[in-house]
Image (tube, rainbow, N blue to C red):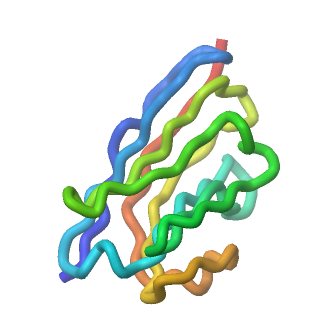
Amino acid sequence: EVRLVESGGGSVQPGGSLRLSCAATGYTFGTYCMSWFRQPPGKEREGVARISAYGGTSYADSVKGRFTISRDNTKNTLFLQMNSLQPEDTAMFYCAARRSALCDPNWRLYNYWGQGTQVTVSS
């Protein structure tokens, strides 16, 4: 059974940092594309960052230079380092796995999802 479990969310002030983790079990983690998505309150799900099985990364324009996605294939874990957080980053963050080495920005093409972790940025 595939499981993705996110952690690391919380409440921070503007300008603060958080590091999200996503622990994966039940499949060969290193061969899958992994991505982070988020869904702000009342809005649609949107891509944040993705990392292919080969290590190539891509970011949403809104987070470039502030967020860094990485993966540790020896620990089957995906990370998202988030710096300079702003109120508009407030959202439920989800990690997702795609049964492909290559990523796609369309969330509908991802096969497995975690339960989400809440990130709230407020003064």
Residue occupying the point 43% across, 35% down:
19
In the displayed structure image, the side of residue 67 where residue 53 appears, left or right: left
Q: Quadrant of the C terminus?
A: top right
- Name the one closer to the observer, 80 or 54: 54
- Name the one closer to the observer, 103 or 107: 103
In the displayed structure image, the side of residue 51 where residue 42 appears, left or right: right
Q: How many marks?
A: 0
Rendering coords of residue 3 (x, y %): 25, 71
Task: Write down the quadrant of residue 76 in the picture.
Answer: bottom left
Residue occupying the point 36% across, 81% down:
31
Residue occupying the point 74% across, 55% down:
60
Rendering coords of residue 69 (x, y %): 52, 50
In the displayed structure image, the side of residue 10 where residue 89 appears, left or right: right
Furthest toward the right, the residue is 61
Q: Is residue 84 above or below residue 64?
A: above
- Name the one closer to the observer, 114 or 25: 25
Q: Quadrant of the N terminus?
A: bottom left
Q: Is residue 91 above or below residue 112?
A: above
Residue occupying the point 56% across, 34% down:
82
Rendering coords of residue 100 (x, y %): 47, 88
Q: Is residue 122 above or below residue 59?
A: above
Q: Is residue 62 above or below residue 96?
A: above
Rendering coords of residue 89 (x, y %): 68, 37
In the displayed structure image, the side of residue 113 where residue 48 appears, left or right: right
- Name the one closer to the observer, 114 or 27: 27
